[in-house]
Structure formats: C-alpha cells, structure tokens
Amino acid sequence: RELGSLGAAAGALREASPAGANVAGIDGGMNLLSERLVRDAERLGGKLVTRYDVIALDRDPRRPGWMVIQRQPTNGDKTAVARGELLVMAADGPTSVRLMGSHMTDAQNYTPRSGPRIALATLVLDCPALDDAPRGTGVLVSDDVHDVRAKALTHSSAKWDWVAREAGEHRHVVRLSYGRMTPKGAGPSPEVTLEDRHLISLALGDASALLGVPIAPEQLVGADVVRWHAALPRTDAGHTARVTGFRRALTEIPDAVAVGAWLSGTGLAAVVTDTRQQVRSLLARHGYDVTGT
C-alpha cells in the first residue's frame, strides 16, 4: 500500500536484495560439485577414464553387455575397450544418435541440430569504477547490437559473494559469452574461432562498452578462455518430436538409456531429475535395488 502497486513493491524488494540473490550457487564454484562426484564415484568402485574419444559402441560377444571402443588422440590414437553390463549414454544429441545408430531403428530420423560453438572469456580486473556494479549482475546483448560481439556479460563478483571475497577490494571478475546461433550451414560465429589472446582483447573492449566504464589493458590482472562444442542443442520446431522419437526407439534396447540437456532441457534441475529417473528405471529393470536412489 505504501508504494501504490504490487510491481512497485516487488521492485523495492529487488533493490534491497543483494546482487545475485536470486541465483543459487556453490561457494568456491561449480567445479566443486564435479570434483565431489568424481570422489564419490571412485569411493564406490568406479573407474573414470579421461582424454579418450568414444568412437563406437558394440555388443560384447563373450557376455551380455556393451563394449565401448575408445581412442586416445594424445597418445598416437591408441585404442582401448571398456566393458559394462549396462550403458548410460551421456553425450550431446548428434553424438548419442551416431553411437547408438546401429542398435536402433531409424536412428537418423532423431538427430538434433547441433547448437553453436561457445567461448567464455573471463577477465579479472583491477577497476574501482566497477565497485557499484553499474549493470547489476550482468547484461544480455540483443542480436540488433552490432558494436559489441559478446552475447552476454556476467559480473561474477557482483553476482556471487564468494567471488567478491576471493577477488578482494576493487578487483572484479567479469565473464563474457561468445557464440550466437548462426543459420544452418553458416559455420560458427567468427569470434569463437579467434585465438585466446585475440578473444581476450575483444572481451576487454566489449566489457568496457557493456559496463559503461573505460577499462585499460593494464587493468587486466588475468584472463582465461573456456570453449564448449555442442554444449547445447539447437531447439528448433522439430526438436521435441525428435527427442520423443529417440527415447521411444531407445526402449528397444533394455540395457541402455540416454541422458543430457538435449533430452531433458537445460539447467541442472532438469538434467539431474531426468538422469535420476532414467538410471533408476534402468537399474530396476535389471533387478537392482533402487531404494534410496
């Protein structure tokens, strides 16, 4: 009543909230989650094999189950075979369909379109002018903006308290995202093909423009670039039908399931919930006790 409307009251509450209050996170970063999952898997007897490409899936001729054919590009394309009773395919859509194709009916009909290649440039800046978080926790950039190549900026030290504490006084962490959706067959956005040093230079200029604060190269304390290939599906008009068809066809294979954002939808909540359901169903079908899972 004091402010005259529900919208005004909501705005007042939002202004009073700390930056990033509507975003959950983990103190120390999401990497702690993956590290904990690795430790738990190893504690339970799991073996994690990294730096291999899976090039094929085949049936084990000696016993029921699967053979995963792997190649190690960093070791002269050395190959290896992993065997298992059950298969959980956790990969992007095109890879999942390609690997499962010879074991499914009409698999090629379910191949989703690949999403854009993405590059994330993180900048650590000594910049007191950012202390007031001039753009709040971040900015989404319209396709109609042509003087900035980034599609989004996150002011990480304004969004998460633990980042601000680690950064220290007058030091700020900002992350810029590159890699817009391009027309089919057009190739990736040109900025994601830049070398790291050139992308960091571009990000510095984009950050200055988006934040409305001059940022000189000497204010850059450190930087890092992370690149993602096929991290997200291209959810066009036929995507839901392809997902439904793929999962229906996969029921022909009782000892395998597929999981991932291209099937469940994006976001940890969607992916984790769907993965639990799929794995629980797979284990139950094969006589495993799923109580408490």
Image (spheres, helix red, strand yellow):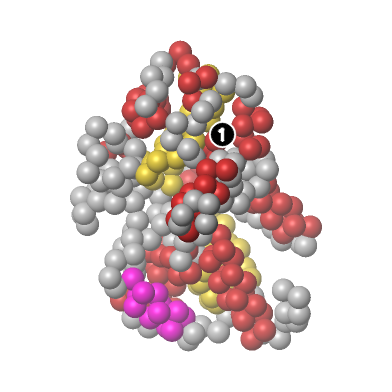
Q: Magenta segment range? A: 239-250
Residue 202 placement (x, y as % from top left)? 34, 27
Foreground: 229 or 97? 229
Residue at 64% of width from left, 51% of height from top?
34
The secondary structure that most of the magenta stretch takes on is helix
- Residue at the (53%, 52%) spot, across then down: 2
The image quadrant where one finds the C terminus is bottom right
- Residue 193 lies left or right of residue 216; in this view the side is left
Above or below 6: residue 164 = above
Report the residue that reaches farthest toward the right.
43
User: Residue 98 placed where, x, y %?
Assistant: 39, 67
Which quadrant would residue 231 be assigned to in this image? bottom left
Residue at image location 31% in from the left, 63% down from the top: 113
Foreground: 256 or 243?
243
Q: Residues within 10 Å of mark 1 (few under 14, many from 20)?
A: many
Residue 273 lies in magenta, yes or no?
no
Q: In this view, does 236 lie above or below 141?
A: below
- Specify the quadrant of the image occupied by residue 281: bottom right
The residue under the point 48% across, 28% down is 123
Which amino acid, mark 1?
A: Ser
Which residue is farthest top?
218
User: Which residue position is annotated with label 1?
Assistant: 157
User: Magenta span has 247?
Assistant: yes
Q: Where is residue 161 in the image (x, y as percent from the top left)?
A: 63, 38
Secondary structure beneath dot 1 equals helix
Residue 90 in picture, x, y percent from top left: 52, 64
Specify whether 142 is left or right of 132.
left
